[in-house]
Amino acid sequence: EVQLVQSGGALVQPGGSLRLSCAASGFDVSDTYMSWIRQAPGKGLEWVAVIYIGGTTYYADSVKGRFTISRDGSNNTLYLQMNSLRDEDTALYFCAKEKDRWFDPWGQGSLVTVSS
Amino acid sequence: NFMLTQPHSVSGSPGETVTISCTGTGGSVASNYVHWYQQRPGSAPTTVLYEDDQRPSGVPDRFSGSIDISSNSASLTISGLKTEDEADYYCQSYHGSDHAVFGGGTQLAVL
């Protein structure tokens, strides 16, 4: 079964850093496109970042220069390193496997709260 | 910038048919496929349609999709509404080849 299990959500102060993890099973994270998508409280979905099979990465303008998407094939895990966090980064963060530019499945979500 | 706009909310009674629109601005919805997700409260989104009108296994044929080039919009139609269909629905496509774009989401109420 293809599955994504997330960890790493927390309360962090503005300007702080946090790393989210997304452990995959049933497939190899290095053999597919993987994305992070977030959802602010009571709001809609916002795409955050993608990593391609070859390692190329792209980011939403709102996080470019502050967030880094990466993966580790040895433990089959996707990561999102978030630095210089702002209040507006508060959201539920989902990892997702891409299938021909649509997302399936999704992880269960990791809550990131940025507050002093 | 390419954007997808959805109505904030729609409603229908059990057994009725509802349609949720997803209108593109800053680009053509026909340039890339449109996909649709259902999100129930407290849960991650799940796919109800992919590539404009394709249903994943397990999604009933009450869910259908279409593209209207003249209005630059995609539509998700749910027929024979059931109370279990009450959820938020999001359309999604790609801007160019690198940035995924989501619509703002539509809250479906089954009254």
Image (tube, rainbow, N blue to C red):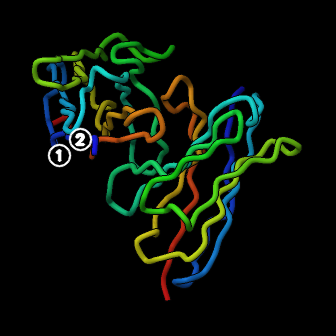
Percent x, y of residue B15: 18, 19
Residue A107 is left or right of residue B46, and the answer is: right
| Quarter of the view holding residue A74 | top right
Percent x, y of residue A58: 54, 47
In the displayed image of the protein, which residue is found farthest to the top?
Answer: B61
Give me the disc on residue B8: 1
Chain containing the residue with disc 2: B
For the point 18% across and 30% down, the residue is: B21
Give me the disc on residue B98: none
| Quarter of the view holding residue A28 | top right
Chain containing the residue with disc 1: B
Give me the disc on residue B106: 2
For the point 64% across and 36% down, the residue is: A52
Percent x, y of residue A75: 86, 45
Query: Do marks 1 and 2 share a subunit?
Result: yes
Q: Quadrant of the N terminus of chain A?
A: top right
Mark 1, secondary structure of its residue: loop
For the point 32% across and 34% down, the residue is: B91
Q: Residues within 10 Å of mark 1 (few under 14, many from 20)?
A: few
Three-letter code, disc 1 = His
Q: Is A68 drawn above or below residue B85 in the view shown?
A: below
